[in-house]
Image: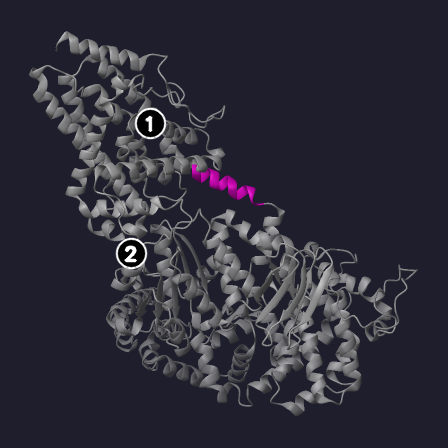
Amino acid sequence: MAPRWFGKVESKAKKLLSPSAPSPSPSPIPSQPAFKPAARPIYQLMPLPPTVTDAETSPLPSLQERLWNQAYDELKASEPKLVEAYEKILSVALHRNNPSSVICESTENEIEGARETRCRQMQQLVRDGLDRTQRAASIKRGIDEGLQAVQAVRGIVDKAIQAAPEAAIAWVGVCLGLEILSNPVTEARYNRNGIAYVLSRMEWYWNLVSLLLDENKAEQSSAGLRVQLEKHVVQLYEKLLSYQVKSVCLYHRNWAAVVLRDVFRLDDWAGQLDDIQKAEAAVRTDSGQYNNEQSKIYLRKLTDTASALEMNLQGIHSAIKDQTRQQEKRYQDAKYEKCMQDLHVTDPREDKKRIQDTKGGLLRDSYRWILDHAKFQQFRDDPQSRLLWIKGDPGKGKTMLLCGIIDELEEGSNCLLSYFFCQATETQLSNASSVLRGLIYLLIIQQPSLISYLRSKHDVTGEKLFQGINVWVSLVEILTDMLKDPTLTDVILVVDALDECITDRPQLLDFIIQSSSSPSSRVKWIISSRNWPDIEDKLDSAKQKVRLPLELNKDSISKAVDMYIGYKVDRLACHKKYDKETRDAVEDYLTSNADGTFLWVALVCQALADPKVRKRHTLNTLKSFPPGLDSLYDRMIGHIGDSKDADLCKEVLAIASVVYRPITLDELKVLIESLEDLDQDDLEEIIRSCGSFLTLREGVIYFVHQSAKDFLLNKASDQILPSGAAHQHHAIFARSLEALSETLERDVYELGVPGLPIDQVSPPNPDPLASIRYSCVFWVDHLDDSEPLVKMRDKDLQDAVTVHDFLRKKYLYWLESLSLLRSISEGVTAVQKLEALVVKTKEAQQLTELLRDARRFILSHKRAMEIAPLQVYASALVFSPTRSLIRELFEKDEPNWITLKPSVESDWNACLQTLEGHDDSVTSVAFSADGQRVASGSRDKTAKIWDAATGTCVQTLEGHDDSVTSVAFSADGQQVASGSSDETVKIWDAVT
C-alpha cells in the first residue's frame, strides 16, 4: 500500500488511541461493582473518532449514513413484512412522550421512506430511548455493574449520534435493545445473549467505516478490494439490523404477532447470531487484505472492550431479577403483611392445586387440543382480541381446560398472569368482590411494587377497605389503577366458572367488558361459564371477544375425553389388577357412553375404584351406570336409598345442600343429632357413601361439582328434602342454637387478660369453638331463611322462649366468640336481621326491647371488641348505660378489679352511632332516601359516604380544593352532589 495512505491511517489510529482523545462520559458508578472484568473497568471504553474540525469529520457522517441506510433499505426489500411491523412499533414509540396522542395497536406506519425525513424520526427515537434508559437507571440503582454496562452503551450511542446524526438508523435498535435487557421478564436465553452480544460490539461495528473504508484513498490497485469489503460491511450491517428488528418485534409481540408467526422462527436465535459472526469473519478477512496493522490493533482493542461489555450486559437480566427479589423483600414490612392479610380471601394458586388434586390431576392430553384451536390462537396472537369466552355445559372440562391454559401461559409467556376459580359451593369464592381480591392478591404476589395502589387506600381505612356496601367500588378502582402501571406490559386475567359467581355477577361482567374494550387497555381476559342466557346477554355487548363454544367442538372434546378415559382406565387396571379383557371392556363402555363429559367418566371411575367393587363384579357394576350426568346422579341417589345408611346419607346431603359454606366433619356432627355418637372413621365412611355427590378434603365436606348440588336441589329435592328447604333451614337453626347454648361461656379460650389483642390469640388444642364455628356465624341466617314456616319461626321469636332465652343468658359470650372468630361485623348484621324479624311478629315486646338494646350495645362497642375479645366484659359493659338491659343481665361479668367505675348515663342517649374519619370540622350531612347511607362534607376538602347501619365509611370522595360545605343525595340514591368553597359543585357516583 502507498506510504501516503498508510501514513494517514497511522495518524488517525494514533489520534484515536491517544489518552487525550475525548471519551464518553459515564454515569456515576458504584465503588464495588458486582461484576469484575479481567482487563479494566467496563466504563473505560475506547474513544470514538474525535470531532476536531469539520474538515476532518465531514466525510464520515456521509459514509456512515450511506452504508447504514443502504443496509436498512436492503433489509426492507428482503423482509418487507418484518420491517413494516418494526416501523409500526417505532411509530408508536414516536408518540410515547406525547400525552395528547392516543396509542393503540392499530397505529399506522408513520416512518417516512425518504431518508432525510426518516433520519429526523430516527434521531428523535434515539433521543427518547436514551432518556428512557436514563430514567430507568435512576430507579434501578441496585444493579451495580449491570447498570454500568447500560450506561456505557448509552455513552457510545450519545457520542456517536452527535458525531453522525444522519446515521441514527443504526442506533434505534440499540436503544430498544437496552429496554429489552432491562426488563425483568424477557425472552429466551439465546435471544438475551444475542442482544447482549450485538449491543456490546456496536462500537466495533461503528468504527469499521472510519478505519477500513477511507473514501479519500487514491490507490486504484486496491479499489476492487475496497468494493468487496464495503459489500461485506453492508451485509454485516443488514444482519445486525435484522437481529435487532426481530428482537424488538418479539418483545413488542402485541404489534408483531403475525410477523412472529409467519416470517421467522422464534427458536432460531442461535442461528441468526451465528450468521452475524460469519459476516464479521468475512469483514475481517477482507480487511486483512486491505488495511494495515494499526487498524487491526485498534479493532482488536475494541473487540476486547466489547467482550468485557458483553459479559456485563448478559448479567443485566439476572441483576434485574435479583433487584426484583430485593424489592420484594423491601416490601415485606409490617404494613405490607397486614395489607395482604386483610386483602386475602383465598390464594388462587392453592385453589388450582386443590381442584386439580380433587379431579385426579391435570392430564395434558386432555387439554392440548385447545392450544392449537384457531380461536385460541386468534386470541393469543391478535392484539384486538382481548376477551376469550369458553362456554359449555356442566362436566365438559371447562375448569381443567383453564388449568391447562394457565400452565401453558405460565411456562411459555412473558405476560403477568392472574386467575381465580369461582365455586358456588363456597361463599368466599362465589362473589364478585372475592374475584377481584383474588386477582389483585396474585398480581401483588408476583409484582410486589403493585401493592402501592392498594396501600394508598388501606393505610387510611385498614381492614374496613374490604367491608361495607362499596367494597366493590374500591376494588375496581384499585385493580384499574394497577393495570395502568407503566412497568406492566401484557397482563392476562383468567376467571373460571362465572356462572358460579352468585353475588354481583352482573357487576363483574360489566367490569370485564369495560376493561377489555378500552382502546388503551393492556389486559386480556379468559373466562369460562355455562351456557346461561344472562351471561350471554351481557357478553353480547363486548366488542373484542372471541367465543369458543365447546358444543361446537365435539370432535376435539371427544378425543380429549378418550385420552382421559385411557388414563383413568390404566390407573384402574393397575389398582384393581384387571386383565386385558376387563380393561378393554371398561374402556369401551366408557368411550361409548361418555358423550364428551369428563365428569361422567370421573364419577364412574370413582365408583369402580370403591374397594367394595370386586374385580369379578366390575363389568356388571359398570353396566349399571347410565349415560348422561342427570341419569348417573339419579342412579346414585337410588343406590344411596338402597344402602343401610340411607337415612344418614340423605340427612348429610340435605345439610350440604343448604349450608352457606362447606362445613367440617365436626360442624356436621353438631347439625345432625344422629351423628353425635359416631367416631371420625364412621363419619368419613358416611361421606364416602355419598361419594358421587360429596368429597372430603382435609376434614371439609365439598360437592364434587356444582352440577351435583344443582341436581339435589332441583331434581332430587323430594328425596333429600321431603319437607322442603325451609324446614331444613329451621332444623339447622334449632340445632345451632342448642349447640351454642351448651358450649358458649365466658373466656372460652382462657385468655385471662382483658386487653390481649386478637392478633396475639391462638386457638387452644382442642379448640372449644371448632364444632360451632359455622353455627356461631350463621344461626340467624338459617332462621331468616325458614320464613315459609312462619308459624314455626314466630314461635321461636316469642318472649321467654328459644331466642329470647339464648340472648338473656349467652349474648356476651356469643359476642366474645364472634370476636375470636373475627366475625363481629357478621354479628352486627345478625342482630339487625334478628331485630327486623321480631318486629314483624308484633307480639314479643320484651324480646324487641332486648334486641334494641343489644343492637345499641354491639354498635357502640364494636371496635373495642374487634381489637380485644375480652373487652366485651371490660370497657363494653363498664361504659354502657347503667339501665342498659344487656349490662343489667350480665352485671356479674363486669371485672371485679374495677373498684371505682366511671360515671355514665342511665340510658342510651339519642346518639345511635358516632362516625369518625374526617380530619377537620364536618359542615354538612345528608341521608339517602332509603336511609341506608349517610353523606358528610368536611373542611378537610373531602366528602364521605357511610353505611348507616354499621357506621362503616364506604367511600371517600376527593377532588375539591377547599372545604366541602354541602352534600345531597339524588332521589334514587345513585348520585351525590357536593358544594365547596372552591366555587365548584361536583356530582359523584354514589354506587360505583
Callout 2: SS? helix
Q: Nearer the viewer, residue 378 or 748?
A: 378
In the displayed image of the protein, which residue is found farthest to the right?
900
- Crowd class of label 2 (few under 14; some 14 to 19; many from 20; radius 10 Å): some
Which residue is tagged 2?
381
Mainly helix, strand or loop, the magenta region? helix
In the displayed image of the protein, which residue is found farthest to the bottom?
791
- Using the rendered view, name the quadrant where residue 830 is placed: bottom right
Q: Quadrant of the N terminus?
A: top left
Which residue is tagged 1?
162
| Mark closer to the observer (2, 1) | 1
- Using the rendered view, name the quadrant where residue 408 is placed: bottom left
Q: Which residue sits at x=85%, y=65%?
A: 878
Q: Nearer the viewer, residue 756 or 293?
A: 293
Q: Which residue sits at x=43%, y=70%?
A: 498
Look at the image and give the residue range highlighted in magenta: 320-332
- Using the rendered view, name the quadrant where residue 231 is placed: top left
Residue type at numbered disc 2: Asp
Disc number placed over residue 822 in the picture, else none: none
- Crowd class of label 1 (few under 14; some 14 to 19; many from 20; radius 10 Å): few
Earlier sequence position, callout 2 versus callout 1: 1
Callout 1: SS? helix
Q: Nearer the viewer, residue 668 or 963?
A: 963
Q: Horizontal placement of 788 versus 541: left or right? A: right
Q: Position of residue 962 (x, y in %)?
A: 65, 55
* Magenta stretch holds residue 629: no
Residue type at numbered disc 1: Gln
* Magenta stretch holds residue 331: yes
